[in-house]
Image: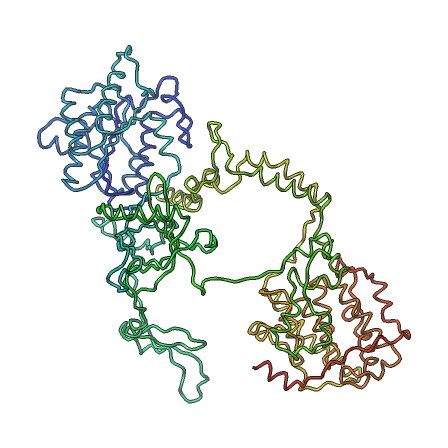
């Protein structure tokens, strides 16, 4: 847990630190993490490590996370103890304890001095303790010293016991990053100066509770990706309340004091600030925090319509009418209007609610769907300062855990705030706590239904149970409420495909692309999934571990952002940003070993199915919308021209353009006579339920009304798009063509025109097979009609009249319009 922290970094800059080590090995290993070629000096590695420490402090941005820098072995003596009592030579305070500045970062990275003689690192530790004592006083701070040295120079340990006691009493931890240090410490037989210094420094660090790292080991740790530490702040401190023993609000049966913290919260990059280069050049150097600062002012003016004589209603700004902030109120949209709300209204609108957690009841954990878990869960613990609260909270948590239950809780953060609903889930492990998970209200849930694929993938339609009305054509679309019609034609497993087995088989052929038996396909897919099991990933040591754990995966966008900011800060004149660190994307890309392991399984899946790449029409949604509007307008125009040419006549009162807003504003479930095409397109375009079979059945029943041609073309277009060519072709052959060419076809009135079915047939021939004829294999892959068969379709011949269809009651258009409004 992050708290107030103060640290001092001591860097040994003596000659042995910056001279090239013999053999060019740099003290063993490269350190990993991109820290160089392995030929760096100890000082260069120390600079890189300190740079990472300072960078992490900058990224954190906490005002209570402070650091200072000392140089030991400097050619200058500049520290408070030297001024007070003398001594402590060759020790320089490079930066006092405070927030990290860009100047300090640049100094460590590029300008760090190289001393010409050695200093005493123990004197540096004493100066660092004094700096911490001066800054932190007796306040509650976490205090730490980091010492970077190779321990190759003479060190005075005469007062080491007193210094250890001082550091221990004041709560200062000393961590040593030793270049040239061994992993377990030097052997006792080695009595060299470096080995003796290392042993004494290790004892010093252990006495203060600190750690000792090899230089390359510490550098690898510091160069690894890390997340910023966040100081724990309670979101709410209040009571968890259950029921009432007497029925009154002041006597609950269970009450325990709890603290709630944010358990998971998205880490977002900071927002950009306005910056002015002109202001930066003119800034006062005594106030570096204001360099480039820009002040923003905002004004409000009245927007009035032109009212002068001859005004055209153009909106203009009245420059002479300005508004003060007090003259403004907030307004909310209500339809097309804005409704102003004053501060008094907003206060009165607040819901009366009391702060705290209030248990409404209990529920089995599995009864809450996982998709109901909303964002920002909280961790709830008992009041740390109350033993009684800890006891009651642990009993409550263990009871939930034992019963496998969750508590349904109303949560109110502050008085009169909108309440939230959530569940409390127990967590029993090394520590006992509860998680509060936000769950949705009714308004937050999105209910979507999609047609099932079961009938399409079944081996036969006989194995699927359907419920439908045999003859939709025998009913008038407006004869019953839409809900009744929908209930009669909705199926239990994928709509009325069983009504037409050849059509269902054609759809299955389109989806079922297996080359092997169903059982073999299932086995291969199962093997592929098992090969991608993330619980059997292999770590660097060859041990199995879980891969892609959230605690191990870093946000690549977040890490890349700070990589670029740090580079631009250090290199303002560099035109290029640094390349992306491969480690950033490693957590969101498949592991190479996992890809290698799954490739054979994937090849078996490819062999089991016919895989075809589908080329999509590269057109924008805007262009597609325009195309649809133009097509609808052309349909209306062509309908009128063709009807006039065929002598059928068109009543202008009956011609209604399809309304796009009507298609989206109403949930159409039946095809009416006032706007059959609009109703039909609305039904086939619905996404909440599959009404395509229903729309086709009802459109075929209404096709003989006065808008016959328009309806026929719309029906044909939809059957092509939705792969219903078999149904359309069967209807066109068995009903339309047979009726039109039968002996009594000339006298059958179907569209209100003079020619009856025979006249309508002539109009269809004039339109041509491309828009009114059979659907061919060129248009729909599942069709069995060739282009030649479609051309022969319009060859006239006398056919026997089919059985008389059930009469469809004519419904007055005006009456139908009134029912739509109802």
Q: Position of residue 562 (x, y in %)?
A: 38, 44
Would you identify the image quadrant in which residue 190 lies? top left
Q: How many marks?
A: 0
- 5 on left or right of 613: left
Image quadrant holding the C terminus, namely: bottom right
Tell me where residue 683 appears, x and y as whole percent. 63, 70
Q: Does 610 sit left or right of 481 as displayed?
A: right
Give the residue at the far front of this rendering.
246
Residue 307 visible in the displayed image: yes
Asked whether 198 or 44 is in front, the reply is: 198
Is residue 268 at all visible to an observer of this figure? Answer: no
**Residue 302 coordinates in the image, percent (x, y):** 34, 77
> What color scheme is it?
rainbow
Q: Residue at x 34, y 56 (%)?
A: 274
- Rendering coords of residue 471 (x, y %): 73, 72
Which residue is rendered at x = 66% and y = 41% of the image?
605
Residue at left offset 30%, top offset 27%: 177
Q: Residue furthest right?
A: 798
Give residue 220's quadrant in the image: top left
Quadrant holding the N terminus: top left
- Residue placed furthest toward the bottom: 309
Outermost residue on the top side: it is 189
Q: Quadrant of residue 798?
A: bottom right
């Amino acid at each position: 847990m992050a708290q107030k922290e103060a640290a001092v970094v001591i860097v040994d800059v003596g000659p042995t630190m910056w001279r090239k080590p013999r053999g060019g090995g740099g003290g063993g290993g490269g350190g990993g993490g991109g820290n160089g070629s392995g030929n760096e000096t100890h000082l260069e590695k120390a600079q890189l490590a300190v740079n990472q420490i300072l960078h992490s402090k900058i990224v954190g941005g906490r005002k209570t996370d402070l650091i200072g820098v000392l140089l030991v072995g400097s050619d200058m003596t500049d520290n408070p103890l030297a001024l007070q009592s003398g001594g402590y030579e060759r020790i320089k305070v490079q930066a006092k304890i405070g927030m990290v500045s860009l100047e300090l970062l640049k100094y460590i990275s590029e300008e760090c001095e190289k001393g010409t003689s050695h200093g005493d690192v123990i004197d540096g530790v004493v100066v660092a303790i004094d700096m911490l004592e001066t800054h932190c006083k007796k306040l509650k701070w976490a205090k730490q010293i980091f010492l970077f040295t190779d321990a190759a120079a003479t060190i005075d340990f005469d007062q080491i016991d007193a210094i250890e006691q001082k550091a221990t009493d004041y709560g200062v931890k000393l961590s040593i990053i030793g270049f040239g240090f061994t992993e377990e410490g030097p052997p006792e037989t080695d009595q060299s100066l470096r080995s003796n210094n290392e042993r004494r420094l290790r004892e010093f660090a252990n006495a203060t509770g600190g750690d000792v790292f090899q230089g390359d080991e510490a550098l690898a740790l510091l160069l690894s990706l890390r997340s910023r530490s966040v100081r724990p702040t309670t979101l709410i401190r209040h009571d968890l309340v259950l029921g009432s023993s007497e029925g009154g609000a002041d006597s609950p049966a269970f009450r325990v004091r709890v603290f709630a913290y944010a358990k998971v919260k998205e880490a977002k990059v900071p927002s950009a600030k306005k910056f002015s280069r002109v202001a930066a050049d003119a800034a006062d150097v005594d106030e570096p925090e204001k360099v480039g600062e820009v002040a923003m002012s905002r004004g409000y003016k009245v927007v009035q319509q032109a009212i002068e004589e001859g005004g055209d209603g153009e909106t203009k700004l009245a420059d002479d009418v300005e508004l003060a902030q007090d003259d403004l109120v907030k307004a909310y949209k209500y339809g097309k209007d804005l409704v102003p709300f004053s501060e008094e209204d907003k206060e009165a609108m607040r819901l009366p609610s009391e702060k705290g957690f209030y248990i409404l009841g209990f529920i089995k954990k599995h009864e809450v769907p996982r998709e109901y878990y909303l964002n920002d869960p909280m961790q709830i613990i008992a009041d740390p300062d109350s033993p009684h609260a800890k006891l009651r909270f642990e009993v409550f948590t263990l009871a939930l855990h034992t019963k496998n239950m969750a508590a349904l809780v109303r949560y109110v953060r502050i008085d009169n705030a909108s309440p939230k609903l959530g569940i409390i889930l127990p967590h029993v492990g090394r520590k006992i706590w509860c998680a509060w998970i936000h769950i949705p209200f009714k308004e937050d849930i999105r209910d979507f239904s999609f047609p099932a694929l079961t009938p399409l993938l079944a081996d036969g339609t006989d194995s699927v149970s359907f419920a439908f009305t045999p003859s939709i054509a025998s009913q008038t679309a407006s004869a019953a409420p839409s809900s009744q019609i929908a209930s009669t034609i909705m199926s239990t497993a994928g709509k009325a495909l069983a009504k037409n087995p050849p059509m269902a088989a054609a759809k299955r052929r389109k989806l079922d692309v297996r080359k092997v038996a169903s059982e073999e396909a299932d086995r291969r897919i199962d093997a592929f999934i098992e090969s991608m099991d993330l619980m059997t990933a292999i770590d660097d040591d060859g041990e199995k571990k879980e891969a892609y754990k959230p605690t191990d995966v870093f946000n690549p966008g977040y890490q890349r952002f700070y990589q670029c900011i740090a580079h631009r800060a250090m290199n303002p004149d560099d035109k290029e940003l640094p390349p992306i660190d491969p480690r950033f994307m490693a957590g969101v890309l498949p592991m190479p070993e996992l890809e290698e392991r799954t490739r054979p399984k994937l090849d078996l899946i490819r062999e089991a199915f016919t895989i075809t790449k589908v080329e999509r029409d590269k057109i924008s949604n805007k262009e597609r919308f325009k195309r649809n509007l133009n097509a609808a307008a052309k349909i209306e125009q062509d309908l009128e021209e063709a009807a006039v040419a065929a002598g059928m006549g068109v009543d202008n009162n009956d011609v209604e353009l399809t309304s796009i807003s009507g298609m989206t504003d109403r949930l159409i479930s039946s095809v009416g006579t006032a706007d059959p095409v609009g109703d039909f397109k609305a039904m086939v375009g619905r996404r909440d339920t599959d009404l395509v079979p229903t729309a086709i059945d009802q459109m075929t029943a209404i096709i003989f009304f006065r808008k016959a041609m328009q309806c026929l073309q719309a029906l044909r277009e939809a059957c092509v798009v939705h792969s219903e060519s078999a149904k359309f072709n069967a209807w066109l052959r068995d009903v339309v063509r047979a009726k039109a060419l039968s002996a009594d076809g000339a006298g059958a009135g179907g569209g209100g025109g003079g020619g009856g079915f025979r006249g309508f047939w002539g109009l269809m021939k004039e339109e041509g097979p491309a828009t009114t004829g059979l659907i061919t294999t060129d248009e729909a892959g599942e069709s069995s009609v060739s282009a030649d068969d479609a051309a022969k379709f319009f060859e006239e011949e006398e056919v026997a009249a089919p059985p008389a269809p059930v009469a469809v009651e004519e419904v007055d258009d005006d009456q139908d319009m009134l029912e739509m409004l109802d």
